[in-house]
Amino acid sequence: MKQSDLFNTLVEENIFGFETSTLKDLKSDLVNQIAKSPHPKWSDIEVLKVLLQVVQEDFISCGTSGPMHLTDSEVKVCLRAIRSILGRSDLGELDLPFRDFSGFGDWWRKEGMVGGGSWAIRRGYIQDQFQPLLEKIEDKEEQEFLANISDPVTELADLKTWTEIKSEVLQLRNRFAAAKTPQDFSAVGTACVRVIEGVSRVAYDHTIHSDPKDEIEPPVDKTDIRIGRVIQIGLSGRKNEQLRNLAKACSAAAHRVKHGRTPNKLQAGIACDATVLLTSIIQRIETARLEAEI
């Protein structure tokens, strides 16, 4: 999740013809929904991290006369969601003696945070309130990432249903978000291949997708063969040639990152995107096939 996911974006063109994007208006309905239950796309941890960063930055701006993204009513919505997620995540509490920017102003004047050097004092106070929680989140992300890569992929349980694959795709997104080193990015590639092998296992049916030349069913890790057959049958004909090539390229992108010597964030991110796209393509093909059989 990014900060921009929480806001409606205002796109404007300057006098030179270049577009600029400005975060404008909090998506309050989205934040309120997240307060009630975890979001299907983003984990509680990554949502909490972004919310804390947005609110911290705005409180610092409020205390130092800087630009702000949130209004009084919007920051209340964010703080409510933060406290709700903290309760679900057992990461501690955010105990502020005020509920919005107006309250913060009244509070700092009451506490004597005025006069020379007051901007630094107010900035330091806000950082002291938020940084411990942000550091806990960083630690938890690191722990979850290490836990996910502590066992070899071959020892993990097989992905046998589309529901399991969707869950694995969500974990893949979280793994990429926590990746920082070439080793981390390589592990992302490995996770991409695991998802693709799961797709190979779930989508390929030897009675439907086999080639007459096959003496035995191709093994699951022969994803190019198995997924290739699913694509050939589901997207047959010259008019679907580009789609077949797209699906094959997605699989190749994931394998390149897995076996790359020094993969970077860009390559790992593209591999993740390619894996998600390939998964969606194959599921659509299989859904169409099953609907045609009814």
Image (cartoon, rainbow, N blue to C red):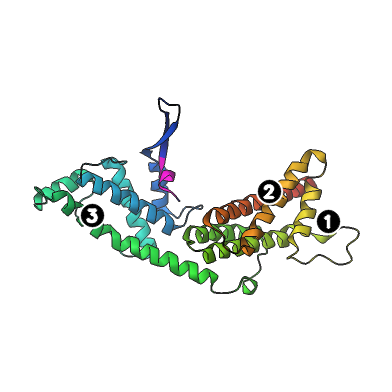
Q: Amino acid at mark 1?
A: Ile
Q: Note whether residue 42 is visible.
A: yes
Q: Is residue 50 magenta?
A: no
Q: Nearer the viewer, mark 2 or mark 1?
A: 2
| Marked residue nearer the N-terminal end (1 or 3) | 3
Q: Amino acid at mark 2?
A: Ile
Taking depth in this image into account, of 136 and 64 the one nearest to the observer is 64
| Marked residue nearer the N-terminal end (3 or 2) | 3
Q: Residues within 10 Å of mark 2 (few under 14, many from 20)?
A: some
Look at 23% across and 54% down and name the residue there. 126
Q: Which residue is mark 2?
A: 281
Identify the disc placed on residue 126.
3
Q: Nearer the viewer, mark 3 or mark 2?
A: 3
Q: Based on the displayed image, in which of its 4 quarters is residue 46 positioned?
A: bottom left
**What secondary structure is marked by label 1?**
helix
**What secondary structure is marked by label 3?**
helix
Q: Position of residue 24 (x, y in %)?
A: 37, 36
Q: Is residue 268 left or right of residue 201?
A: left
Q: Report, in whole angstroms, how far the alpha carbon at label 1 lies from the one at label 3.
A: 62 Å
Q: Amino acid at mark 3?
A: Ile
Q: Report, in whole angstroms, how far the alpha carbon at label 3 lies from the one at label 2.
A: 46 Å
Please tell me whether the stretch drawn in magenta is mainly helix, strand or loop. Answer: helix
Circles 3, 2 touching at the beta carbon (< 8 Å): no
Q: Is residue 42 left or right of residue 224?
A: left
Q: Position of residue 140 (x, y in %)?
A: 41, 66
Q: Report, in whole angstroms, how far the alpha carbon at label 2 lies from the one at label 1.
A: 18 Å
Q: Which residue is mark 1?
A: 208
Q: Residues within 10 Å of mark 3 (few under 14, many from 20)?
A: some
Q: Is residue 278 left or right of residue 68?
A: right
Q: Which residues are magenta?
A: 2-7
